Image (cartoon, helix red, strand yellow):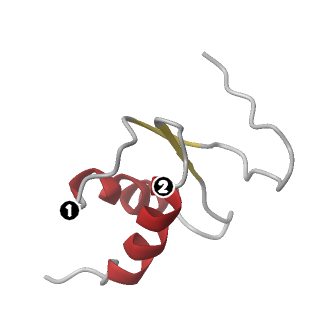
């Protein structure tokens, strides 16, 4: 079985990631998207070539709001 072509998505994400100093990759999805699909899309960055420089991947439970700080619970 073939999955979706994520090439264009990774081109944009990789470009954005190279301009950022963070080692963390935060991602989320709209409530209408199943969390498993969001997780698969986000973690697909781990197998990207060339490799992303991020080392920690975080699936956010709540959809972030632009300009607002993301709070994490440990």
Residue 20: give x, y in percent of width and height.
55, 48
Which residue is most to the left? 1
- Mark-to-mark CA distance, 1 and 2: 13 Å
The residue lying at 36 percent from left, 35 percent from top is 55
On-image quarter of the N terminus: bottom left
In which quadrant of the rendered view does residue 4 lie?
A: bottom left
Q: Quadrant of residue 45?
A: bottom left
The x and y percentages for residue 60 are: 61, 43
N-term-proximal mark, 1 vs 2: 2
The residue wearing badge 1 is 49
Question: Is the residue 9 above or below the residue 44 in the image?
Answer: below
Q: Position of residue 52 (x, y in %)?
A: 33, 51
As drawn, the residue found furthest toward the right would be 67
Q: Residue at x 81, y 37 (%)?
A: 69
Percent across and percent down for residue 67 are 86, 50
SS for dot 1: loop
Which quadrant holds the C terminus?
top right
Where disc 2 sits, the SS reads: helix
Q: Residue at x 21, y 56 (%)?
A: 47
Mark 1 nearby-residue class (10 Å; few <14, some 14–19, many ≥20) = few
- The image quadrant that residue 71 belongs to is top right
Give the residue at mark 2: 17
Q: Which mark is residue 34?
A: none
Number of labelled discs? 2
| In the rendered image, the vertical position of residue 9 relative to residue 23, given as above or below | below
């Amino acid at each position: 079985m073939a999955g979706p072509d994520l090439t264009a998505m990774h081109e944009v994400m990789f470009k954005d990631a190279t301009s950022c100093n963070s080692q963390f990759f935060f991602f989320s999805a709209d409530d209408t998207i199943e969390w498993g699909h969001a997780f698969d899309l986000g973690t697909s960055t781990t197998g990207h070539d060339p490799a992303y420089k991020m080392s920690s991947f975080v699936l956010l439970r709540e959809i972030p709001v632009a300009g607002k700080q993301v709070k994490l619970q440990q």
